[in-house]
Structures are given as C-alpha cells and as structure tokens.
Image (spheres, rainbow, N blue to C red):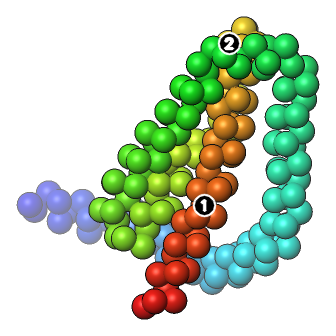
Amino acid sequence: MSDLLTTISKPAVQIFAIASMASIGLRYGVEALVGPLRDFWAVVLAHRILPVLGVATNVALMTLVVLTVALNLSTVLGVFGTGAIAASLLFIAGAFCTGWVLGGAFGEHLRDEMALGTAQRNFAAALVVATQAFDAPGVLVMAVVVSLVTMAVLFPAAKLLNRRAHRQSAVA
C-alpha cells in the first residue's frame, strides 16, 4: 500500500493524472455542447431528404422487380404450376401467424404490426443474396416471386387489419 502511495505522490504521475482528467473532461464537455446541435441538424437534414430518398428507393426496388421479371419472363412463367406460389403462400402465412402469436407478448396493440412485419421479409436483402450467392437465375426469380406474392397478400391484409382497428377504436 505504501508503494502505491509513493508512486501516486510522484510529480510525473500527478501531471499524467491531471492531464488525463483534463482530456476526459474536455472531451465530454465538448460532446455535451456539440452533441445537441449535431442531433438537431441531423434531424433537420433527415426530414429534408427523407421524402426524396423514400421515393428513390421505391422506384429503384420497383425497377429491379420489373426488370428481373421482364428479363427472366420464361423462368417466371415456368414458376406457375410448380408449387412455388403455394410454397410462398404457406411461408407467408406461417410467418404472419408466428408474428401474430408472438406479437401478443408485446401487447395487444402491437399484434398487427408484429404479424405484418414478420410476414414481410426484407426483399432487398433477399435479392442481394440471390444475386451474389447463386448463379442460377431461378433463385433470383423465386425471390422476386415470393416478394410479389407477399405484396399481393399483405397489402390487402394490412387494409383489413386497419379497418378492424378503426372499428375497435370507434367502439371504445
């Protein structure tokens, strides 16, 4: 214990300790002053570019889907009658039901969102994996088919859930 006190009492150690504390204090002080300004401007910038980026990403995704279907039209048409659409429907229904059941654990008010969010898989990630990891065009086509079937099923489902929620709120 006395060795520790002797070491701490040396001028070089004291200067290092003071410099370290000053550096830490300056860092956190500047962060405390600059942080709120940075956060404010980030929110302002996000609100300005969000509408543009939202449209751009939707256009890009729709262009990708349309071009993929158009360039692989024979493969897409070959999907009909193979059971791929039925498998897609089963997959989507299973994911929806899983989200519905598990969504109740987060509260009844989140059940719809959890069900739709679980059933709606990340199309962009699936398309990246399909194009980067597989050489066969059928994998990409199947990813697009599942995406199209998902949209065809979940948009009406979301509308129905929205109507049900409005009816319930009108009664309450």
Which amino acid type is marked by label 2? Phe
Asked which secondary structure carries label 2, the reply is loop
Q: Is residue 171 above or below residue 86?
A: below
Cα distance between the residues tagged 2 and 1: 33 Å
Residue 156 lies, in percent from the top left, at 65, 56
Q: Nearer the viewer, mark 2 or mark 1?
A: 1
Residue beneath disc 1:
158
Q: Is residue 55 left or right of residue 23?
A: right
Residue 75 lies, in percent from the top left, at 79, 14
Which amino acid type is marked by label 1? Ala
Query: In which quarter of the view is residue 166 placed?
Result: bottom right
Asked which secondary structure carries label 1, the reply is helix
Which residue is at 66% across, 16% downward? 81
Which residue is at 89% across, 48% downward? 59
- Which residue occupies the extreme front position in the image? 81
Which residue is at 85% across, 13% downward? 74
Which image quadrant: the C terminus?
A: bottom left
Which residue is at 40% across, 55% downward? 100
User: Quick check: can you spot residue 81?
Assistant: yes
Q: Is residue 116 above or below residue 120?
A: below
Q: Residues within 10 Å of mark 1 (few under 14, many from 20)?
A: some
Q: Are marks 2 and 1 in contact (CB under 8 Å)?
A: no
Query: In which quarter of the view is residue 87 placed?
Result: top right
Q: Is residue 11 left or right of residue 51?
A: left
Instruction: Please state which of residues 95 and 93 is positioned toward the viewer in this rendering.
Output: 93
Query: In which quarter of the view is residue 103 placed?
Result: bottom left
Q: Residues within 10 Å of mark 2 (few under 14, many from 20)?
A: few
Name which of mark 2 and mark 1 comes first in the sequence: 2
Residue beneath disc 2:
134
